[in-house]
Amino acid sequence: MKIFLDTANVAELREAKSRGSLDGVTTNPSLIAKEKRPFRELAEEICQIVDGPVNLEVNAPTAEGMVEEAGGLITIGKNVVIKVPLTAEGLKAVKILSGQNIRVNVTLCFNATQALFAAKAGASFISPFIGRLDDRGQEGMEVIEEIATIYDNYDIDTEILVASIRSPMHVKDAALIGAHIATMPFNVYDRLLHHPLTDLGLEAFNQAWKTVSE
Ligand code: G3P
């Protein structure tokens, strides 16, 4: 499973890259706003750091506006993927952009039929938001299972990008289902590495090593 960071913070991206486990990045308007930097300069820096897909979201409400915005975004870097919301206008934009061989990630997906329609429009990636479903008392991971089954039934090659991840368990469950990508905030990414027995084991080794003579 590919690991993406869900962030626009360049320090977090550099750290993950140096650990050898950064396959791509997803951003959204909220994450970009958090960085308080001019958009273009920030997006260019992200494209230089990240070797894999860099997801940048359009903000226009109409298909025409989204396509125009996408035209500007793809000039930022060769690895830019256009993020488009799962609306009727968004799907019209997906059809046009995918027809121009521009990769599109359809975001704000909350059920399996939405994911089917995004794939039919030509999405390269679908982003179901599982944490926000969990927040409302619905099992978000069930939607991932359903999308995986439907895509498998019809040999659909749209990649399932599990988003709105809140915990390491989400990442493990996504991998067990066979999702292509999980995107997560840095704090979840970091917690995936840690185990108290690793720390205790290391501490014991360090103590023992102090008693060893040269
Ligand atoms: O990738 C989607 C993500 O940014 C949404 O996450 O935690 O705001 O639901 P969250």
Image (tube, helix red, strand yellow):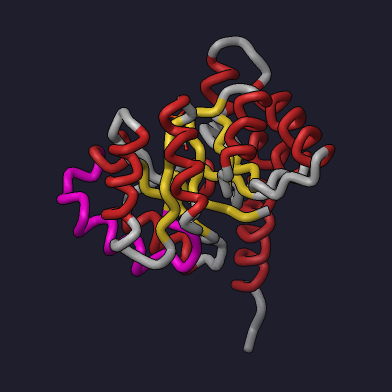
Q: Nearer the viewer, residue 177 or 74?
A: 74
Point out the residue furthest to the right here: 153
* Residue 186 is at least partly visible in this image: no
Q: Report the magenta stretch's main SS.
A: helix
The range drawn in magenta is 34-54
Displayed quadrant of residue 134: top right
User: x, y (%) of residue 6?
Assistant: 45, 44
**Ligand 1's quadrant:** top left
Q: Quadrant of residue 202?
A: bottom right
In percent of width and height, residue 95 lies at: 50, 42
Q: Is residue 90 left or right of residue 192?
A: left
Rendered residue at 57%/39% (across/down): 121
Is 114 one of the magenta-colored residues? no
Residue drawn 60% across and 72% down?
210
In this view, which residue lies farthest toward the top?
Answer: 137
Instruction: Report the side of 4 relative to 196 (left or right).
Output: left
100 and 126: which is toward the camera = 100
Q: Quick check: can you spot residue 211?
A: yes
- How many marks on residues? 0
Residue 40 forms part of the magenta stretch: yes
- Asked where in the image residue 41 lies, by quadrant, the reply is bottom left
Q: Position of residue 46 (x, y in %)?
A: 33, 60
**Towards the viewer: 175 or 41:** 41
* 128 in relation to 197, above or below: above
Question: Which image quarter holds the C terminus?
Answer: bottom right
At 70% from the left and 39% from the top, the residue drawn is 174
Q: Position of residue 17 (x, y in %)?
A: 47, 65
